[in-house]
Structures are given as structure tokens and as C-alpha cells.
Amino acid sequence: MELISKAAVVAELERRKKRNVLNEGAFEEDIDILSFIKNLEVKKDVDLKEDVDRILYENDWDYDEIDFYEFAKHFFELGLKTKKGE
């Protein structure tokens, strides 16, 4: 899975909007998409204990039965999202 920062997406849409200024349909579409993306909530603070407990509960894992690959993958991806401000 690849993650793209919200700021990079907004910047690309802003460039696209400038190119589409004469194409009314595409321009309005760009405005709608930008509005949607700018209003997305970004989770910055993570409660590690709460997230660990939630992952264990959702997967019906006990502390001694953890699938460490999936567990590590989840927190690696969460770290990437948090680092990028998503």
C-alpha cells in the first residue's frame, strides 16, 4: 500500500484546476474534489494502548495468540500515516 500526503493531493488538484479553468465541467469538478479533500479529518494523535486493544479485540486475538505480521503491518502503516499528517 502506498500513502499519499493530503497536501500533495491538494497541490496537484490546485495545478489541475488552473489547467482546467477554460473547461467549466472539469473546473467545477476540481473545486468539488478539493472541497471534499480539504474537509477530511486527519488523525494526528494516536493512543497506542487503545489502538492495540482495539486491534486485538477486532481480530479476536489474545496477547499470546497475536499474528505478529498483521499486528506489525498495522502499526507500521499507522506510523506512516501519522508521520505524513494523515
Image: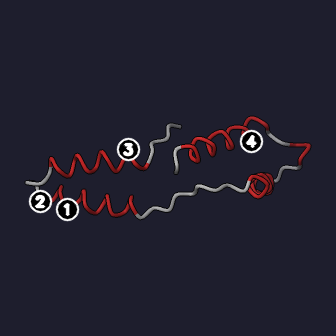
Task: Kindly report which numbered mark, 3 or 1, lies closer to the viewer in this rendering.
Answer: 3
Q: Mark 2 and 1 residues: CB-CB less than 8 Å, in contact? A: yes
Q: Residues within 10 Å of mark 2 (few under 14, many from 20)?
A: few
Residue beneath disc 3? 8
Q: Is residue 34 left or right of residue 68?
A: left
Residue beneath disc 2? 24
- Secondary structure, mark 1, is helix
Which residue corresponds to the image point at 31% horizontal and 59% vertical from the top-left? Answer: 33
Q: Amino acid at mark 1?
A: Glu
Q: Mark 1 and 4 residues: CB-CB less than 8 Å, in contact? A: no
- Along the polypeptide, which appears first: circle 4 or circle 3? 3
Q: Is residue 3 above or below residue 48?
A: above
- Along the polypeptide, which appears first: circle 2 or circle 4? 2
Residue beneath disc 1? 28
- Along the polypeptide, which appears first: circle 3 or circle 2? 3
Q: Which residue reaches farthest top?
A: 69
Q: Is residue 79 left or right of residue 39?
A: right
State the CA–CA distance, disc 2 to disc 1. 6 Å
Residue beneath disc 4? 71
Q: Is residue 15 above or below residue 27?
A: above
Q: Quadrant of residue 23?
A: bottom left
Image position, residue 53 (x, y; %)? 80, 56
State the CA–CA distance, disc 3 to disc 1. 20 Å
Task: Kindly report which numbered mark, 3 or 2, lies closer to the viewer in this rendering.
Answer: 3
